[in-house]
Amino acid sequence: MTAEIKRFPGETTERLTPRKQAQRAFADRMAPERRRWIRRNAYYYEEDHRYLRFLVPPGRKVLVLGCGVGDLLAALEPAEGVGVDISLRAIDVARANYPQFTFHAGDIEDGVTIERLGGPFDVIVLPDAIGAMEDCEITLSLLHRLCTRETRLVVAYYSKMWEPILTLAERLGLKMPQLELNWLSAADIEGLLRLADFDIVKHEWRILLPKRLLGLGRLVNRFAASLPVVRQFCLRIYVVARPALGLELGTPSCSVVVPCRNERGNIRSLVERLPRFCPDQEIVFVEGHSSDGTWNAVGEVMAEARDVPIRRFRQDGRGKGDAVRKGFAEARGEVLIILDADLSVAPETIPKFYGALVAGKGNFINGTRLVYPREQNAMRLINLVGNRAFSILFTWLLNQRFTDTLCGTKALTRSHYLRILADRAYFGEFDPFGDFDLIFGAVKQNLKVAEIPIRYAARSYGETQISRFRDGFLLIRMVVFAWRKLKAI
């Protein structure tokens, strides 16, 4: 056995099963031709890499298992990149073309290989590698050694509905040859991930036309491929998951941020009703240029407070979104929770949001007003019907279940908020209320969403600042915006 076929010191191909040896021999034989095949089907790879770049923000520490000649790893623009492939020759090509990254030849189903990769990684990408695995469940389980609770696993595979077309293309010399791969649907992949203790964040289908066709492919893939029903005929399947183990956060500090404008009559009740639910807790009021003395009302409860620290700030701009950003910037807690001052969401429910977040049930906890019966006059019928219709649309657009996008009560950690804030330029200034700013940002960052049903109460003081016509138009505008930014990419 010669030294050049070693993957890592002390490991040789003798550890490979006959099937793995056949895979390596085939991949080595194809390696010199791989880039030619990529150029020949450049549009397909462009579309695949485009969506993977959407799922994997630049500047992360990324591991690609089944990296081939390294083109995908380079396309993801990682701050630190590592690639592994079973083909020795493919790794030689990758090292020559991308010396800034680290490449290893090895069997990703070998626990020793996985251990020697180091880690942890921010993102682990498996582009079709799941199709060659001999034991998917055990191999996926090995990846926990390379994960933290924040790691995201991205699995990309092809739809078996395309098998006859791909087989024909291969026989006609239009597609790179490949060995027989595992027969896996999106549901199969999700099931294997769950067996391996990964929690599904979202899944998507992309690329309905894998050829450019004078620009028609791009039009179809951007505007039609992601539509309901249609998307299930797409070539590519993408599943994003997070580790389901060790998600508990302990008892981090918490800031309850309360945007308030003309809510003087609700301030004292809010403070008195809000439970003490963690050892280090504060209330941060952000007052929005009220005309009814809300600022002074907050000052009065601050002077009397003995149990929970209370702070107040005047927002710099206008709108709830601006107030929330001001509150988050001033907050000291590691957990950030929004509570509207109108008391339509009972302060007594806030511990549920904190509890779900620190227990690891989700990374972004969103309230929903559409489960329990509401108080009379809390929500008009037309608003209720509209909200239920839009919940279906937003669930499709966001690839996670959202039954109520306009419930103001939300919870997330400071670290996740800072990630949303850092990538805010992707969406820009588009949302005066702040709900969609956070929701779309959370989805873009692959945060796991969990919903908590709340009982929606009618306002007892002041006037609602919600207009069913204005907010109906806002929802329509947000649907179009989300479709452009999250689907038509």
Image (tube, helix red, strand yellow):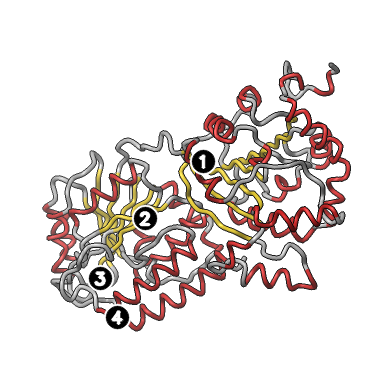
Q: Name the quadrant containing residue 117.
A: top right
Question: What is the distance, in whole Å, between disc 3 and disc 4 at their CAs?
Answer: 26 Å
Label 2: how many residues lie within 10 Å, few (<14), some (14-19) or many (20+)?
Answer: many
Mark 3 or mark 1: whose residue is earlier in sequence: 1
Looking at the image, residue 484 lies above or below residue 171: below
Q: Which of 336 and 3 is in front in this view?
A: 3
Question: What is the distance, in whole Å, between disc 4 and disc 1 at their CAs?
Answer: 41 Å
Q: Which amino acid does label 4 sit on?
A: Ile
Mark 3 residue element = loop
In the rendered image, which quarter contains the N terminus? top right
Res 328 label: 2
Res 346 label: none
Q: What residue type is labelled 3?
A: Arg
Q: Name the residue under label 3.
A: 261
Mark 2 or mark 3: whose residue is earlier in sequence: 3
Mark 2 residue element = helix
Res 193 label: 1
Q: What residue type is labelled 1?
A: Leu
Mark 3 or mark 4: whose residue is earlier in sequence: 3
Mark 1 or mark 2: whose residue is earlier in sequence: 1
Question: Residue at the location (39% across, 68% down)?
Answer: 391
Is residue 265 at all visible to an observer of this figure? yes
Q: Name the residue under label 4.
A: 382
- Point out the frontmost of discs 2 and 4: 4
Mark 4 or mark 1: whose residue is earlier in sequence: 1
Label 3: how many residues lie within 10 Å, few (<14), some (14-19) or many (20+)?
Answer: many
